[in-house]
Amino acid sequence: MTVRPLRLGVNIDHVATVRNARGGVHPDPLRAAEAAARAGADGITAHLREDRRHITDDDILRLTRGSDLPLNLEMAATDEMLRIALQHLPHAACIVPEKREERTTEGGLDAAGKHNQLAPIVNGLAGAGIRVSLFIEPVTEQIDAAAALGCPVVELHVGAYCEATGEARERELDRIAAAAAHAEATGIECHAGHGLGFETVSAIAAIPTIVELNIGHFLIGEAIFVGIEDAVGHMRRLMDNARSDGPATASGDHGGDA
């Protein structure tokens, strides 16, 4: 049986977080993107937030012009972010919920309840040739809502899986696998992300209907100790091994989120 490839998108937001803590230009997110590419990443993700707390407009410009990897722009469903996306034309845009006071994205987008707000953003991005995805919870209602909006991709929020232990983790893994299967049956490409680390990635990577993982905070944190290329390279190997070995259960040797 042919094993479906699994792509790795590396989120470089927190390289910019470190840079912005002191100001100036170091460390450079573009340099991080180049290192991730050398280590086997398939794409780069960057979240341009309303408050520009990490990635800036100039970062998006430099990444779209200077990186050999396709850029996935994470963005809120606002007219401002739509204008920026249409200006820079990234390969992909993932629409995420955004709260000004949150430290990180706290859950999936309510695509089912916000159809009218999302539709013009989705249509504007798609009309410019940008691949659109929605960051959602792993439930069929939200996948069906993404399909109704005409989105070709969903990214499942797997944070609850990463934070759970024991039987609760098994239930979350089953929920993710069922949602990924439903997405494929609906004709939607399925991605996953949020909270994945070395000890949590394998069970998610083994789900054959997931075709891309987006991982950031853990990799940038690990890079402090071993460097970006080693961190991304090890994650790449774990993903590839899990995909080759086939589906796993959450009760296997996956531990807590690292």
Image (cartoon, grey):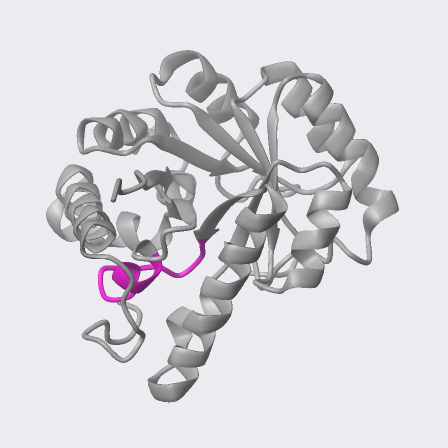
Of 58 and 105, nearer the camera is 105
Residue 41 at x, y percent in the picture: 28, 34
Q: Quadrant of the C terminus?
A: bottom left
Would you say residue 100 is visible in this rendering?
no
Query: Which residue is depicted at the point 44% across and 53% down?
Result: 193
Rendered location of residue 134, percent (x, y): 63, 45
**Of all residues shown, which one is farthest toward the right?**
116
Answer above or below: position of 124 versus 113: above
| Horizontal and vertical percent position of residue 53 | 54, 44
Q: Where does the N terminus fall, quadrant-wise?
A: top left
Which residues fall within the magenta stretch? 193-204
Q: Name the residue nearer the viewer: 26 or 254.
A: 254
Q: Is residue 41 visible?
A: yes
Q: How many marks?
A: 0
Residue 58's place in the image compared with 100, above or below, is above
Q: From the top left corner, tell me how far across and down residue 220 is, in percent.
A: 29, 48
- In the rendered image, the vertical position of residue 240 relative to residue 250, given as above or below: above
The extreme bottom residue here reads 167
Is residue 17 left or right of 137 when viewed as pictured?
left
Please tell me whether residue 12 belongs to the stretch shown in magenta: no
Asked whether 250 or 106 is in front, the reply is 250
Q: Residue furthest top?
A: 65
- Residue at (12% x, 43% y) in the render: 230
Residue 194 among those drawn in magenta: yes
Closer to us: 98 or 170: 170
- The residue depicted at 21 percent of the width and 43 percent of the height is 232
Residue found at x 34% / y 25%: 30
